[in-house]
Amino acid sequence: MHDLPIASLHKGGCHCGAVRFQVTVKKKTAIDCNCSVCIKKGFIHLIVPKTDFQLLKGADILSVYTFNTHQARHVFCRICGIHSFYYPRSHPNGIDVNIRCLDDDRLDQWEIEKFDGQNWEDNITQIT
């Protein structure tokens, strides 16, 4: 029902517009994680291969936050503070886009799967 017959290109970015990107979406399935950082950020995950993501502008505006294992690189706009994408620990060859930061964000068009990130180590094989 939510699968796209062909890949579609979506643009997005941060609140102030300093960071802009485009992403090729092949399946409209996203992940809602309940870990401590995702809950606070309101991040809904679309994990794509790095080849399906292009940062259009704002590389010089991004700041990086890491914690715990410091493998995931949580990037955010240092002007408005929005986390529109990051480099996930779970998919080192991927980019994790916050679907709430897509220009055409309509959560009702996405299949949202729940992920128990509070118990990340026990559950990560569900999404890798």
Image (cartoon, rainbow, N blue to C red):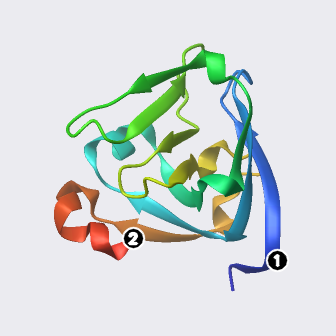
Specify the quadrant that holds the N terminus: bottom right
Q: Amino acid at mark 2?
A: Ile
Disc 2 designates what residue? 127
Q: Foreground: 117 or 40?
A: 117
Image coords of residue 106 (percent x, y)? 70, 57
From what the image shows, is residue 88 above or below residue 61? below
Image coords of residue 36 (percent x, y)? 27, 43
Image coords of residue 68 (percent x, y)? 20, 37
Q: Amino acid at mark 1?
A: Ile
Q: Is residue 65 left or right of residue 14?
A: left
Are discs 1 and 2 less than 8 Å apart at CB? Answer: no
Q: Is residue 24 left or right of residue 86?
A: right
Tag of residue 104: none
Question: Residue, x 52% and y 34% (percent of image)?
Answer: 83
Question: Residue, x 52% and y 51% (percent of image)?
Answer: 96
Question: Residue, x 47% and y 43% (percent of image)?
Answer: 87
Image coords of residue 101 (percent x, y)? 65, 42
Disc 1 designates what residue? 6
Q: Foreground: 97 or 111?
A: 97
Q: Foreground: 106 or 3?
A: 3
- Total numbered badges shown on the rendered structure: 2
Evaluate whether residue 103 shows in this view: no
Badge 2 element: loop
From what the image shows, is residue 44 above or below residue 21? below
Label 1, label 2: how far apart the Cα atoms are: 22 Å
Question: Residue, x 60% and y 13% (percent of image)?
Answer: 79
Q: Residue furthest top?
A: 79
Q: Quadrant of residue 73?
A: top left
Q: Residue furthest bottom?
A: 1
Q: Quadrant of residue 78?
A: top right
